[in-house]
Amino acid sequence: MRIALIVIDSGGIGAAPDARFFGDEGANTLEHVAAEEPTLSLPHLAAMGLNRLIFLPRDDQVALKGVAYAMIPQSRGKDTLAGHWEMMGITIDKPFETFPEGFPDSVLTLVESVVKRPTLGNEVASGTEIINRLGDVHKQTGFPIVYTSADSVLQIAAHEDTIPPQMLYQWCTDLRQALDQSSYRIGRVIARPFVGEKGQYLRTPRRHDFTIRPPGPTILNGLFEKGIETIAVGKIGDIFSNQGLSRHLASQSNLDGLEITLDTLAHARSDTFVFTNLVEFDSHYGHRRNPSGYAQALKELDNFLPMLWHTLGESDQLWITADHGCDPTFKGTDHTRERVPWLAYGPKLKPWMGATRLGFGDIGATLAALWEVPYPFPGVPAKDLIIRE
């Protein structure tokens, strides 16, 4: 048995019951994207059940071939770590810290003690905007650009000709360790290399996330310890600090991540779990409020699905979910508190529209049940996906 779980980073399907506490009433990432692009057709996602969870104008009558659920988040947060960790068994009850006014002096002093030079920025900003605004000064001085967003992140941007990526990665490694020893709960330190010249600076695919470690073991640890091969694709390895993972395969784009997933499935031994994140939905289109780009990315995924289906063996399954929302038609540029889909396809699965599930931890609970691994975390296995020989 092989299971592949693909995360549409930010692919929400409507405001969660507690969305009002986050200011996100009315958000619906995937449905609003589809509404903005009336010619968009996603027949394979619809066949997996997406058309049972949201209205897809072009594909609303496609026959169901998979199992579909909606899931309601339980963690106290709408960020990457909260969503992914909850899937694997850890429910966050205290949100990570955010810095809507920029970092306090104590954090900035910590940063500058690590990089051993002054910094630029220290503000909430778009990464593409701030590197073009401060890139020239950065190149002249060698001072790194520090900024944050609505998420719990501390981002350090540096031109690759001024500060080589390996030096930037070492700074972020040291800063991650320093923050972990401090009183600050910052979810991610992100290295943001960029290239180019004045007015045309561009971030490169060499981004690297240095996350706070999960507070305890997850189902990934349980699978790994039982001998199940656990393979991370994209930023999954960073999200879990490589805990419980056999391998971590970096990806350069959504399409690259899909191709790596396909190749990994094609060559994987039995008893393999492949966990993939497609980050461009969030970073390139959700945060940048680009519904057209988001729609094209969904179409790219949809076109790829038949190849993944064809690779599945008799007992294999392909799952698709999301970690939070980031509605590109909504106010602001933040993530949105939404329900998410859980779509499953496999040769032995019977098409079914299941009830809404309370908590992403049901994914981890189902993995545990399939491989008969203890699961001492919140979550209920999805019996529709548990097929025995």
Image: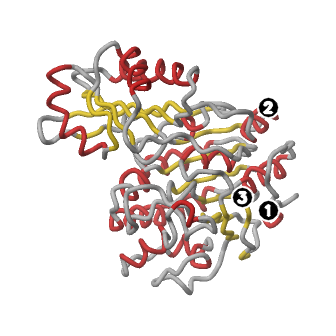
Secondary structure state at the residue bearing disc 1: loop
Say whether residue 205 is left or right of residue 274: left
Checking the image for residue 359, the label placed there is 3
Where 175 sits versus 185, above or below? above
**Residue positioned 81% across, 58% down in the render:** 381
Q: Which residue is mark 1?
A: 382
**Up-down relation of residue 301 to residue 181 (above or below):** below
Q: Secondary structure at mark 3?
A: loop
Residue 295 percent location from the top left of the image:
39, 67
Residue closer to the observer: 147 or 373: 147
Amino acid tagged 3:
Gly
- Classify mark 2: helix, strand or loop: helix
Q: Quadrant of residue 298?
A: bottom left
Residue most extreme to the bottom: 61
Residue at 68% over, 38% down: 230
Label 2 sits on what residue type?
Glu
Q: Nearer the viewer, residue 79 or 268?
A: 79
Residue topped by disc 2: 225
